Amino acid sequence: KAGVTQTPRYLIKTRGQQVTLSCSPISGHRSVSWYQQTPGQGLQFLFEYFSETQRNKGNFPGRFSGRQFSNSRSEMNVSTLELGDSALYLCASRQDGFGTQYFGPGTRLTVL
Amino acid sequence: GENVEQHPSTLSVQEGDSAVIKCTYSDSASNYFPWYKQELGKGPQLIIDIRSNVGEKKDQRIAVTLNKTAKHFSLHITETQPEDSAVYFCAAGSTSGTYKYIFGTGTRLKVLA
């Protein structure tokens, strides 16, 4: 089975721009979660989608949003980028309501 | 709020020695505890997990122990090898309520050859 894939792997943007990141979960997995990873803050939970519905949300501003499609693929959008948004964005999928979570390789976002 | 404390933040051991990483969780509803290993430039990879109905689980050189009363769980790596060098994260989750995972802040393990 193919693992979780994320595209693109690297992105460079400037302040004020917006960005969309994509995640394809493991086949058969209906839950997709997004995390922001920075050296100082560790793994911070952004949100989780399950069967196209946002089920959980972390403590991030409204500039961070996401969605999930009927094939379980998910996108994350960040609008009005700030320097502090520079981070590794990780996507993780799991099969059902609760189960082992598998991570993708991440998208490295740099905001200049 | 819910949180998971992880110690130490960095750990250096000689090759062949054992390494122990400890985590403490706050949410009594937590009943699933995975451990992830993250190598440079990669996403976290699950290495072992334990559910609350089990006190200990082993997989070759890796073991995890859980003390539900004290809300502690630990990762034990024996006979460490240089390829064990990475950042390790613990997490706590629940099969009810929000289904969220709460992650520890990570431990950077260095195995010295």
Image (cartoon, rainbow, N blue to C red):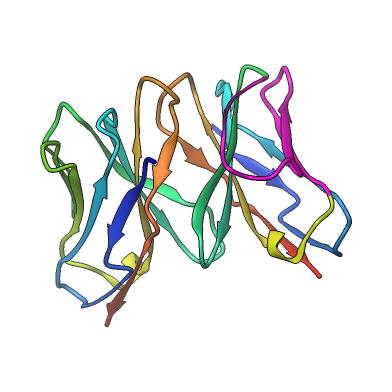
Exactly how many numbered labels are in the figure?
Answer: 0
**Where A4 falls versus B51 (above or below)?**
below
Q: Position of residue A1 (x, y in %)?
A: 54, 32
Task: Report if residue B59 is visible in the image.
Answer: no
Residue B86 visible: yes
User: Where is residue A35 drawn, in percent x and y?
Assistant: 57, 46
Give the vertical position of B102 relative to A8 (above or below). above
User: Image point 16% across, 73% down: which residue?
Assistant: B16
Residue at position x 84%, y 52% in the image: A80
Left or right of B31, for residue A106: right
Task: Name the residue rendered at 73%, 29% in the picture.
Answer: A67
Q: Is residue A78 magenta?
A: yes
Q: Nearer the viewer, residue B74 or A84?
A: A84
Image quadrant holding the N terminus of chain B, namely top left
Residue ranking furthest to the front: B1
State the image coordinates of residue B93 (x, y, percent, origin top left): 36, 34
Residue B70 appears left or right of A55: left
Residue B111: x %, y % from top left = 28, 75
- B54 to the left or right of B92: left
- Residue visible at 58% across and 21% down? A30
**A5 to the left or right of B53:** right
Residue closer to the observer: B62 or B20 = B20
What range of the chain is rendered magenta? A53-79
Residue A26 vs A30, above or below: the answer is below
**A49 inside magenta stretch:** no
Q: Say if A14 sits above or below B43 in the image.
A: below
Q: In the image as oriented, which residue stretches furthest toward the bottom?
A: B113
Q: Can you say which quadrant of the picture contains the C terminus of chain B?
A: bottom left
